[in-house]
Image (cartoon, rainbow, N blue to C red):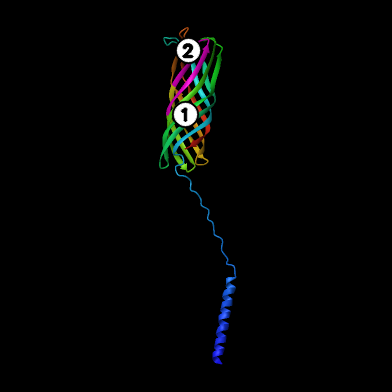
Amino acid sequence: MSINRYIITSAVAVMVAASGASAGGLTAEVVEPAVVVPVMSAPVANRFAGGYVGGAISYSFGGEDRLGIHTPTGTYVGDVGDLEVSGAAGSLFGGYRWNSGKWLFGPELNVRFGDITDDLDYPGPIPAATNASSEISWEAAIRGTVGYEISPTSMVYGFVGYTRSEVDYVTTGAINLDETVSLDGVTAGFGGEYAFNDSWALRGEYAYSGYGKEELIAPAGGRVTNASIELHTISVGVTYSF
């Protein structure tokens, strides 16, 4: 009798255990959702190093050019006034920058063209009533730049270089000229860039251009004047890096 009771008790225990296992198997497993950690891409180091091209709009002013008259032997005759050329222009530029840490350096070619002009009417009498006009057709500069990266998206720079311009002179009266001259000079200035992304950046700049004197001799009458121009230019543009 005790053996039968033992067998029955064991069978019941096995059935209860099996029932518990089956019940557990029917319970859906709860899966915790995976936590997605956003990956932040670090700013590109030395964003401003490499090749670049761009364009800008600018305004030039302060181009004082005194129109003084002399005889061929150098005797001063008198002044008829100042040609203070100014006006808006557009420019195209391109260059390359190497870097050493946060410092950048390299060459740039900059070409500017537009409507930079002035004219004057001198009533006389000494040396004579005179009408004059001056227009800068274009400027081209080759300059060396040195920059410093303030942050991964911004930099400042300075530059100095050689510049050349073509100027149209027309005067009648005390001296009669209709001539196009090329002037050589120096340019210097500073600017900054702010990068929107890895390719495009906004650029602002100030430039000074000073040109040497060019002697202009009237074909009739032999009177002489000197063409000499200084310019201050402020520009805003964009650069594309590659």
x, y percent for residue 91: 51, 28
Foreground of the two, 138 or 15: 15
The kind of secondary structure element at disc 2 is strand
Extent of the magenta region: 161-183
In the rendered view of the protein, which quadrant contains the N terminus?
bottom right
How many numbered marks appear?
A: 2
The kind of secondary structure element at disc 1 is strand
Instruction: Identify the image quadrant of residue 3.
Output: bottom right
Secondary structure predominantly adopted by residues drawn in magenta = strand
Residue tagged 1:
110
Please, is residue 33 above or below residue 4 in the view? above
Q: Residue at x 55, y 86 (%)?
A: 7
The amino acid marked with disc number 2 is: Ile
Magenta region includes residue 87? no
For the residues labelled 1 and 2, the Cα–Cα distance comes to 34 Å
For residue 69, the mark is 2
